[in-house]
Amino acid sequence: MSGRNRSCSSSILQACSSSSFTRQPSRVLIVDASPPWWSETCTVLCQALENFFFLTSSLAGPVRLPLLSVFAISVQLECLLPFVQVKGNLTRLLSCVEELRSLPQEGCVRQRGTLLTRAVLDSLQQLKQYMCHTSHRDINSNCVEVTVLTCQSGKTVIRQLEQGLENSDLMSLRRLLVVQIALQQSLCDRSPACSLETPSSEDNQEESLMLGTEMDLQLVEGTVEALESTLKMWLHEQGGDREHLHLLLPPSCFSAKNSPSPVCLKCDMQERLISPALLASTPDLGMKTESMQDFQPPNKSLTNQNFLPQRLLVVKVLHADGVCQSVLYGLPLIVRPTSCWQLDWDEMETNNQMFHALCHILKTRDWFLLVRSESEPGSSSGSGVFSYYVIQSSGSHSLLLKPAMTRELMLPCCLPVSVEDPPLLALDTVESSLEQLEKDPVFNPLCLDSNLYLHLRIRGLLTRSSQLFGAQGRGQCRGASRPPEGSTQRQGRQSQGRARATVTPLPSIALKMPRPSLTLHHSRPCAPAAFFQDSYEEEDSLRIQ
């Protein structure tokens, strides 16, 4: 792992600790590979599965996908992959994808609903047998989530599953998701990652009850990116046993019984991207911007003056209001025109003018720049992985550089869009609470104190005290191993005698000494000049006598 990844991997792993992923369910993927639709979806689905398996098996940190099993419904029901742990089993996962590719694309499938029901029941029984013969007790064996990928009507598949599983034991089945891959209709007005289909007004009440908490229907576009996003939903934390965050607002006069306690909003947290630090094998991916050294090219350092500057190629102009802050991560770096002494005056002046023009255009037109890392010309080193950044304009003669996420690191985020106003009581409560807060037109971080200095002071004093006590303890240990008192006194007298013998005795009469300089050093106290004058006069009188 590179130094860049090592520096931030500890904080990332602490934030995504294994305790946050203890409730991850086992996954079952049922692929409806029945002709004739399989000929249209085979290529994109297998490519999405390959990308997902390569990414998941390379992730460090907590286990996000503990167990996976894959079934395929073609001319008959086949279990292509029994339950296996994803980490360390990349070869078996890729073999499963190859078996999917080899399934026949022509033929006739009868009793598809019966085969779907058998696949769900077989997966539940298979998990029960696996947990009886495994020693991995950290795997959550109480629940499993089943995902069905099909090109048929999702409502028809759900109806078939409900009829087939009506009298079955589904205690370990947490959720059954039917993903309908759309091939003909356009989904340009829907999110390609997650589009929930709801019953139309013409559907009867029985059909609307099919879309409950245990069975869901999801409509996705038949592209590699959309199918990848569907699979990446498995990488999210699936706890739900306790809320993640309490957001405390000042007390409101509209609270129940005018309670003086703060208004508490209970929230859950969700990751927006996979941290590049969890992919140790790709040091060039998602370069950090926490310090200048992190931004230097690989195998270079600030002390080496022979390295070539990092190259960023501007690839696109972005409108500022079209950039979501959730796709930017890391700490920003300030970009300013260079003051390198190796440039001549004319070149530096021209560079400053061009940089000023770029800042002015970006600010006046409210534009951002999308840039991509470029390798050195003629260089064969590097992994070939690109990093992307967004350059933002600022109010000063400078720019702001922040890393931007890419498709591979992006996790799906299906957030509902509210079209209705909140209830009046809730609106008044929150508004009354916010009115009590101090309002600043400008954010000034110099007004914020995190008590960091106090923490460092206490830690430093504790470290110093422990070192002093340790030194005293070592001294007492040495004192306990000293020889008897009589021998110690004799050794002391001998050492004192030897010490006195090495000291030159003072002369009985004053010798003529050179007059010392009167230069005073403020690092130590010195005698006044009158003292030296009196010493010289006394020395002359002794010499005359």
Image (spheres, rainbow, N blue to C red):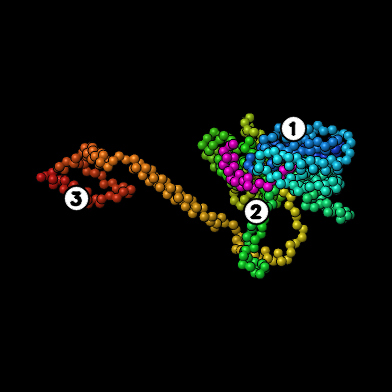
Give the CA separation, mark 2 to mark 3.
82 Å
Q: Determine crowd level at label 2: few under 14, some 14-19, many 20+ residues with C-alpha closer than 10 A.
A: few
Circles 3, 1 touching at the beta carbon (< 8 Å): no
Give 299 or 313, whichever is nearer the viewer: 299
Q: In the displayed structure, does residue 279 sit left or right of residue 489?
A: right
Disc with the residue nearer the chain's start (3 vs 1): 1
Disc with the residue nearer the chain's start (2 vs 3): 2
The kind of secondary structure element at disc 3 is: helix
Going by the numbered disc 3, the residue's amino acid type is: Asp
Give the labeled residue for mark 1.
95
Going by the numbered disc 2, the residue's amino acid type is: His
**Label placed on residue 534:** 3
The range drawn in magenta is: 1-28
Give the labeled residue for mark 2.
244
Going by the numbered disc 1, the residue's amino acid type is: Ser
Q: In the displayed structure, does residue 179 sit left or right of residue 384?
A: right
Residue 131 on image: x %, y %: 70, 41
